[in-house]
Image (cartoon, rainbow, N blue to C red):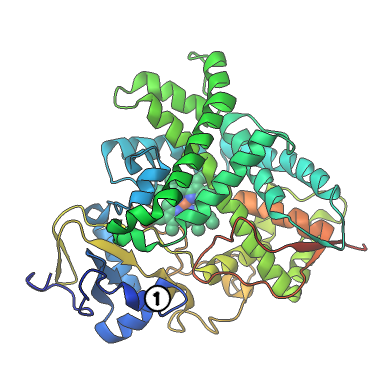
Amino acid sequence: RNDILNYPPGPKPWPIIGSLHLLGQHSSPFEAFTVLSRIYGNIFSINLGSTPCVVVNNLDLIKEVLITKGGDFDSRPDFIRFHMLFGGNRNNSLALCDWSDLQKTRRSIARTYCSPRFTSLQYDMVANVGTDEITTFLHEIQKLPVNTPINIKPLVLKACANMFTQYMCSTSFSYDDEEFRKVVRYFDEIFWEINQGYAVDFLPWLLPFYKNHMKKISHWSSEIRQFILGRIIDDHRATLDYNSPPRDFTDALLMHLEEDPNMNWQHIIFELEDFIGGHSAVGNLVMMTLVSLIQHPHVAKRVQKEVDEITANSRAPSLLDKSMMPYTEAVIWETLRKASSPIVPHVSSTDTELFGFNIPKGTMIFINNYDLNVSSDYWENPNEFIPERFLSASGNVVKPNHFIPFSTGKRTCIGQRLVQCFSFIILATLLQKYDLTAEGKIDVKPGCVAVPPDCFKVILSPRSS
Ligand code: HEM
């Protein structure tokens, strides 16, 4: 790369591994990027294995990559793991594919359902689905012992999964359904997997050592595919009325298949799989927020006060209460800030330039949002958990421009509204009913919104009032 005129500066790579060793010295690769940016500047180059990468570290550069020049940086990394997760071709996945006309179409079909507007029919559907599922969820929780550590994650994930399948496919499953349990677990394994970095991503010659791991990954995804086909899509196809408006997202996808010669059957299954899989992200965020609440009991008390006031202690909270419960929403934002989940790397799809530096086609771009989330340049007392930082003087939720947990621009997250709606309803309900504690200290991985599939237990104590 040194032969490229005006390439960003960076550490001199070692043979074979490049500068991979520099990332291992910190608790997250993004922390390492922040440290390296102090030496090489806000834009620097780094070879990971033989992959040429560029890291951008401040808001102006990040906006340049994601918005101003979004079209030049709209591809994704070509990791073997990503292919394994999506039937041998990562372009089947909405989040891991390169940009294409197909992707534009898939995003636009998804938008109505996955980004429902506040006053839309879809938003009402989200609210109803949330309320119905939360009743079942509470019923299941009540079967478990109180005042003793319980494994709450599988229940949270099942509730999220049913909210997603009910909303997107008008179908939900019993918590005792063994196939459902297995598929929810596989989705969670995949979510954890996607949030990990592996040496084999950058050193593909290590592949023989990862043979079993890769086999496991493709097994999870093929089981999920069979479930979606057999338990969701087949029934929809049999009952679909092409002359009526779509009943849900699944109908909309099936109808589109008939109209668009560029869409095929595989695309439909994978798109549905991608979006149903979004439930794992919500479930994991709920788990992360539970950690925040357990670690900061005064924050939990304030959420309880808010929910008690809004519901007058006489009814269950609903999504329609969200706009009047800014503190609870701020707790979710603060959890996302502290978790500082990375933005999926982008790749340049053409030869281009950034702030005067030449960036050849195929360069992997890491967007260091870790610095945006935890640097004292952007936040007061960044290491403290302070939900109030997201509240204005009049008590409304405000998000600063530099806070972009769902990214921004052409490839921004499509599921962020669903995340806010479903996580809110679960957390408000749990806090209304229970005090939360845990045995001992809970450790979470920095720079990651995922908690391991087998994780910490939570103690639920019914609130005395
Ligand atoms: C904790 C929850 C979540 C977080 C923090 C999150 C964050 C992100 C981020 C940072 C990106 C990358 C954007 C970019 O590369 O510029 C992304 C992409 C994406 N997210 Fe999410 N997300 C969450 C949940 C969801 C859910 C629930 C869904 C689906 C319902 C979803 C669907 C997607 C899709 C389809 C993309 C790929 C968009 C594209 O590449 O064109 N996400 N998300």
Tell me the residue at 59%/61% (across/down): 451
Q: Name the side, left or right, on which 353 lies relative to 414.
A: left
- Other-residue count near label 1 (Cα within 10 Å), few / some / many at <14 / 14–19 / ≥20: few
- Determine the residue positioned at 88% across, 51% down: 314
SS of the residue under disc 1: loop
The quadrant of the image that shows the C terminus is bottom right
On the question of residue 116 being in view, the answer is no
Q: Position of residue 44 (x, y in %)?
A: 24, 75
Residue behind label 1 places its C-beta within 8 angstroms of ligand 1: no
Residue 12, picture quadrant: bottom left
Q: Amino acid at mark 1?
A: Gly
- Compared to residue 231, the image places residue 358 above or below, namely below
What residue is shown with label 1?
24
User: 83 or 314: nearer the eye?
Assistant: 83
Q: Residue furthest front?
A: 208
Front one among 266 and 57:
266
Q: Specify whether residue 55 is in view.
A: yes
